[in-house]
Image (cartoon, rainbow, N blue to C red):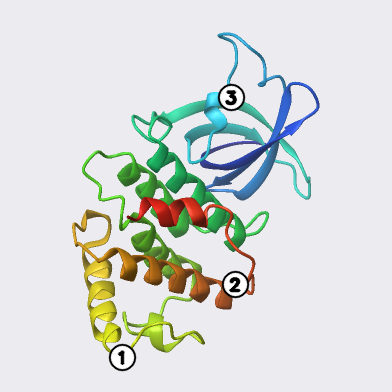
């Protein structure tokens, strides 16, 4: 069956000489894997740019039930990025986001609310005035709600975790920052001290690991921590 859908590219791997297998989180069909032939070619005909992390696409796809790999009939840019592919900091955050999502959802998982949030996140990440130093924190806080394990209030991110890395002096300050980030979201310009910002990032990732039962380290974490200076 041929279906139309919008999609967000998460990752791709090489397949044979010129092809790739790409994972795309689609709004209507959920997380899907597609075999795309002939894209790893040199010259103007190459379409590899369409399959970079967090690329927003309009798709026409062949959707066969129980198929491990489907194929794409047509792929067009939904919105071209102006900064994400060209600025190291934004590219790194994009990779971090795709790693978090890839660990959080499974094949065929569909969640239109999560898709819309991710699409909104991509748009903000590409905007010049978005404060990148707190972007990963906002993403983790907001994303937890769409995955179904966000606490009722900011303090819950601390109280509902097995790990308690904050000192008694840091606790009220940290919860206050969490409230600001929850309220202002990606528009936030709050200035959080570097040491506390890093500790909060590590804590939120521990919080995710507890709920997703996936304790392994994030490959992109080292770079993200450096970007939060």
Q: Residue 122: give x, y in percent of width and height.
A: 38, 44
Instruction: State the CA–CA distance, disc 1 to disc 3.
Output: 50 Å
Q: Earlier in the sequence, mark 1 or mark 3?
A: 3
**Side (left or right) of 162 relative to 136:** right
Residue 36 in view: no
Instruction: State the CA–CA distance, disc 2 to disc 1.
Output: 28 Å
Q: Is residue 121 above or below residue 21?
A: below
Dot 2 alpha-carbon crowd within 10 angstroms: few under 14, some 14 to 19, many 20 or more: some
The label shown at residue 48 is 3
Q: Residue 52: give x, y in percent of width and height.
A: 54, 34
| Helix, strand or loop status at disc 2 | helix
In which quadrant is the C terminus drawn? bottom left
Q: Residue 44: give x, y in percent of width and height.
A: 55, 9
User: Is the C-beta separation of discs 2 and 1 under 8 Å?
Assistant: no
Which residue appears at 42% of the width and 76% of the height? Answer: 150
The label shown at residue 168 is 1
Which residue appears at 49% of the width and 84% of the height? Answer: 163
Q: Is residue 15 above or below residue 25?
A: above
Q: Residue 101: give x, y in percent of width and height.
A: 54, 56
Dot 3 alpha-carbon crowd within 10 angstroms: few under 14, some 14 to 19, many 20 or more: some
Q: Earlier in the sequence, mark 2 or mark 1?
A: 1
Judging by the rendered image, the residue that carries numbered circle 2 is 212
| Helix, strand or loop status at disc 1 | loop
């Amino acid at each position: 069956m041929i279906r139309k859908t919008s999609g967000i590219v998460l990752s791709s791997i090489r397949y044979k000489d010129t092809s790739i297998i790409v994972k795309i989180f689609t709004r209507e069909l959920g997380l899907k894997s597609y075999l795309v032939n002939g894209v790893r070619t040199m010259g103007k005909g190459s379409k590899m740019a369409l399959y970079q992390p967090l690329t927003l696409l309009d798709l026409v796809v062949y959707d066969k039930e129980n198929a491990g790999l489907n194929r794409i009939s047509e792929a067009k840019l939904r919105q071209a990025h102006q900064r994400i592919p060209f600025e190291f900091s934004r590219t790194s955050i994009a990779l971090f986001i795709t790693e978090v999502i890839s660990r959080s959802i499974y094949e065929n998982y569909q969640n239109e609310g999560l898709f819309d949030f991710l699409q909104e996140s991509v748009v903000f990440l590409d905007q010049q005035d978005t404060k990148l130093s707190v972007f990963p924190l906002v993403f983790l806080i907001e994303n937890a709600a769409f995955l179904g394990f966000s606490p009722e209030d900011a303090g819950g991110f601390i109280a509902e975790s097995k790990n308690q890395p904050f000192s008694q002096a840091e606790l009220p300050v940290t919860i206050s920052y969490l409230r600001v980030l929850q309220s202002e979201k990606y528009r936030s310009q709050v200035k959080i001290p570097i040491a506390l910002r890093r500790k909060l990032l590590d804590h939120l990732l521990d919080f995710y690991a507890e709920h997703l039962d996936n304790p392994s380290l994030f490959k992109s974490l080292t770079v993200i921590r450096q970007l939060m200076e």
